[in-house]
Image: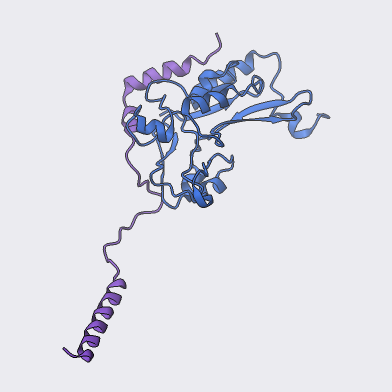
Amino acid sequence: MARMKFLCDADRCIECNGCVTACKNANEVPWGLNRRRVITLNDGQPGEKSISVACMHCTDAPCAAVCPTDCFYTTVDGIVLHDKDLCIGCGYCFFACPFGVPQFPQQRAFGSRGRMDKCTFCAGGPKEPGSAEEFEQYGANRIAAGKLPVCAETCATKALLAGDGDLIGEIFKERAMSRDERPHTWGWGKAYGESL
Amino acid sequence: MNRRSLTAAAGALALAVMLAGCYESPDARFFEAGEYRGAEDPLLTMLEDPEFREQLNRRFDGQRDR
């Protein structure tokens, strides 16, 4: 069975934030929330690198492990989703997530966090796929329509890949092999310095 | 009915009301920790359909360079 993953090719990402904009637009993500963001390392310096980060849909998701209401579930493909009707906005998932993915709208009175929102891999939530109710709570369900997450399909340079981990790994490997040199973002040079 | 019996009846009623507030239902629901309790997602059934999976895989394969 497939394991759905995102992979961002740091050698191709040009920090256009197209993925962020497409995600916010397609899912009508409220003000103040970002399901995806672009992180730039060494911004403004020669050799800067950017990667687009969202929910990693972890195999053993720490958010699900700490949830007191057990509102998380994982599809057969490994997409980590949650039921907002069960979420109490306690924020434990935010503290547990190593990527800072869970977001809280904070649009209610008395500083209440509201129900948690995160990337759904454009797979909606536990409602009728494509229904207005599902869209209002979770955003678009493109997977049910046989499509990729909108961030990956929008990416102009195809830096952001989404899909079965084996397949996108193979695509990335093909790219890396066809380059005249290996990528420098995460490698021996990064680990041991320029003297290597 | 004199004042004393009225007071006694009111006191008994107040005591009954107060004790009723202490009642705890024995029908509590217990769940296993870590077990999803939310609504069922119809997408899970869709993902088990081989034809649908094939459609998804074709779409994913379109991410290759031209």
Above or below residue A156? Residue A121 is: below
B16 relative position to A58: left or right: left
At x 77%, y 34%, the residue is A192
The location of residue A157, given as percent across then percent down, is: 60, 16
Of the pair A44 and A98, the residue shown nearer to us: A44
Q: Residue furthest top?
A: B66
At x 53%, y 33%, the residue is A35
Of the pair A158 and B51, the residue shown nearer to us: A158
At x 32%, y 27%, the residue is B46
Work out which quarter of the rendered image holds the C terminus of chain A and state it. top right
Give the chain letter for blue: A
The location of residue A137, given as percent across then percent down, is: 41, 36
At x 41%, y 48%, the residue is A70
Of the pair B6 and A140, the residue shown nearer to us: B6
Where, by quadrant of the figure, is residue A36 drawn? top right
Where, by quadrant of the figure, is residue B27 drawn? bottom left
Where, by quadrant of the figure, is residue B15 drawn? bottom left
Give the chain letter for purple: B
